[in-house]
């Protein structure tokens, strides 16, 4: 269909997007790479020199580094587990006939539209606060001692808040996928005597596979970069207990003014994200082909 | 008999669903309720009935000039989305109607740029912005958010455009329609719903973006995300006022979100789930 003329035109039309994204990707990344081999502190900008791999070694031998990677993985995997499993269960529930289904859907999807700083501050001050929070009120009502969530379980607290934000997303996507499942297929299986569990395993789950893959891909992109939730609740602490890699790089760059060290951390973050991306993109690429 | 059982089942499922929905929605509901309480009531145990004062809303504007970050949020989110659309529409149009062997690779590559963690480029961007005077300006933030969301805009438009039947365009061309006419009379009417959905979803994403908006702004260009985050320190506002500021910050997007559930699914799954 495409003549040579339209093909030239098509290329011309794609140029701005492609060029802009190329610049956006390459220029800052090249600069990060360059800085990562420099001794460069914003407090002493005159003392710039070549550092070799010093920044990497420094970052690598920092005990906070491994903790931050473990925390990053804990946040990604913890939130994925809660939202995917919870999302499947909620989608199955909402797929049944319900009075007022539209309103229930609106209530459940709402947390997704709450900006991260608001979500985190509301949970911090009004839900999880050891003195005045709703959880504390409930504990006292039950005769238990209130938990100081952000001091005792900082990482878990952040996982709960982030999961609250992403559960609606998973539920909505999975519910939409579920509703496209052929009713007749379900009925036929039922008539053949398939129980609820085997219907779920052999019909519903395979049908949801593609939607689940997409949910995991999208959530992973955002979960690797959780930042505001940590900033306004624990500020990475106590110690480094709730610092993820993104937060560690920010701390190094803008609190210690260590441009070289932060850049090395940034390069490591990019490499890790790319390893994850490689697997995910392959899975999604396969799943998106029709 | 069978009907009685199924209606009982429906009642049980309904109750369970409403309870879960209430629990999930509770933090938002409680924020709105707290915003209508006095500061004393706010820390005085759970109570779902506020005294109904609007004073907090007045105070937030009076003490902290709420309209400034609000205006910043509006300008930055709408601005970055519109610029993104202008850049992305031609690209998505070309990919949908004149696909080549490489189209799919380009789309996947664009998506992969979203995979790059923001912290990987925080340092150079911060320094570039500082040296060019873009730090803490609405223009700087608009540029960054345009680039951050461009891949999603292209992808979304592509999935919508691809569903427009190419034969209609060919028929118009056969009838002697020029390229301009083809775009104005044939393509635009069919593309408008897709463009509108993309617009809506991207305003939501840009409004809630909370890394660049916090890190690249200070007093001047700070949108609502940065404004609210500044309350994390204990010397910030009290809870009732914080709740009022929070309610105002999330209300417009919450309402937009309720109307865009379908588009959200499509847009964020790149057309894989509809």
Image (spheres, coloured by chain):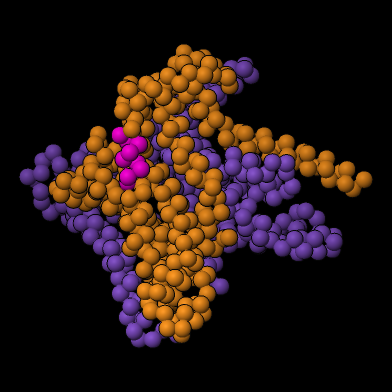
Q: How many marks?
A: 0
Residue drawn at (53%, 27%) of the image: B30
Q: What letter labels the chain drawn in purple?
A: A
Q: Is residue B21 above or below residue A134?
A: below
Which residue is nearer to you in this view: A273 or B112?
B112
Percent position (x, y) of residue A52?
17, 55
Q: Is residue B206 magenta?
A: no
If the image is split into quadrants, where does the N terminus of chain B sit? top right
Quadrant in the picture for residue B114: bottom left
Magenta span main SS: helix
User: Which picture quadrant has residue B233?
Assistant: top left
Question: Which of the two residues, A121 or B28, is positioned nearer the viewer here?
Answer: B28
Image check: A108 left or right of A3?
right
Which quadrant holds residue B262? bottom right
Residue located at (42% from left, 83% from top) = B176
Residue displayed at 55% across by 30% down: B29
Q: Which residue is at a point 28% across and 63% down the rendered structure image?
A: A20
Closer to us: A154 or A212: A212
Instruction: Give the letter of the orange chain.
Output: B
Q: Which residues are magenta?
A: B68-76
Question: Can residue A60 be seen in the rendering of this structure?
Answer: no
Compare residues A123 and B30 and report the one nearer the observer.
Answer: B30
* B96 relative position to A195: left or right: left
Q: Position of residue A274 (x, y in %)?
A: 38, 60
* Residue A185 coordinates in the image, percent (x, y): 76, 64
Residue B35 shows in the view: yes
Specify the farthest residue to the right.
Answer: B1
Taking the magenta stretch, the answer to whether it contains residue B69 is: yes
């Amino acid at each position: 269909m495409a003549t040579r003329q339209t093909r030239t035109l098509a290329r011309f039309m794609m140029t701005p997007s492609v060029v802009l994204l190329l610049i956006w990707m390459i220029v800052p990344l090249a600069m990060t790479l360059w800085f990562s081999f420099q001794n460069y502190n914003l407090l002493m900008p005159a003392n710039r020199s070549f550092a070799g791999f010093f920044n990497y070694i420094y970052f690598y031998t920092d005990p906070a580094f491994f903790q931050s990677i473990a925390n990053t993985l804990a946040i990604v995997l913890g939130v994925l587990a809660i939202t995917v499993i919870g999302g499947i269960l909620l989608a199955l529930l909402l797929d049944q006939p319900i009075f007022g289904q539209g309103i229930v859907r609106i209530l459940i999807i709402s947390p997704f539209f709450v900006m991260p700083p608001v979500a985190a501050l509301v949970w911090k001050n009004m839900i999880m606060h050891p003195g005045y929070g709703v959880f504390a009120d409930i504990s006292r009502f039950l005769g238990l001692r209130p938990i100081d969530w952000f001091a005792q379980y900082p990482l878990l607290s952040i996982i709960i808040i982030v999961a609250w934000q992403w559960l609606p997303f998973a539920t909505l996507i999975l519910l939409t996928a579920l509703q496209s499942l052929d009713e007749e297929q379900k009925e036929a299986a039922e008539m053949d005597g398939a129980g609820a569990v085997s219907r779920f395993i052999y019909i519903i789950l395979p049908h949801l596979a593609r939607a689940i893959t997409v949910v995991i891909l999208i959530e992973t992109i955002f979960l690797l970069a959780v930042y505001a939730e940590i900033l306004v609740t624990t500020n990475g602490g106590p110690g480094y207990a709730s610092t993820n890699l993104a937060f560690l790089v920010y701390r190094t760059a803008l609190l210690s003014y260590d441009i070289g060290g932060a850049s090395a951390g940034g390069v490591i973050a990019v490499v890790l994200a790319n390893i994850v991306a490689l697997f995910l993109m392959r899975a999604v690429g396969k799943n998106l082909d029709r | 008999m069978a009907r009685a059982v199924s209606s009982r089942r429906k009642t049980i499922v309904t109750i369970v669903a409403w309870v879960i929905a209430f629990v999930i929605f509770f933090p938002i509901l409680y924020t709105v309720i707290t915003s209508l309480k006095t500061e004393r009531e706010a820390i005085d145990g759970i109570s779902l009935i506020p005294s109904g004062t609007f004073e907090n809303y007045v105070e937030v504007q009076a003490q902290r000039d709420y309209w400034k970050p609000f205006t910043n949020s509006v300008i930055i989110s709408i601005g970055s989305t519109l610029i993104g659309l202008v850049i992305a529409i031609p690209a998505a149009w070309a990919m949908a109607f004149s696909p080549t062997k490489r189209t799919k690779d380009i789309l996947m590559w664009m998506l992969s740029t979203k995979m790059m963690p923001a912290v990987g480029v925080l340092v150079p961007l911060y320094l570039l912005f500082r040296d060019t005077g873009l730090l803490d300006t609405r223009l700087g933030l608009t540029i960054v958010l345009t680039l951050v969301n461009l891949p999603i805009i292209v992808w979304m438009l592509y999935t919508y455009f691809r569903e427009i039947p190419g034969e209609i365009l060919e028929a118009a061309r056969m009838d002697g329609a020029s390229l301009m006419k083809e775009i104005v009379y044939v393509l635009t009417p069919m593309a408008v719903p897709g463009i509108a959905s993309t617009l809506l979803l991207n305003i939501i994403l840009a409004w809630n973006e909370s890394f660049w908006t916090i890190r690249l702004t200070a007093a001047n260009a700070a949108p609502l995300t940065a404004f609210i985050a500044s309350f994390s320190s204990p010397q910030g506002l009290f809870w009732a006022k914080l709740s009022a500021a929070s309610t105002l910050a999330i209300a417009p997007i919450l309402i937009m979100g309720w109307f865009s559930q379908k588009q959200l699914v499509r847009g964020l799954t790149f057309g894989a789930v509809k």
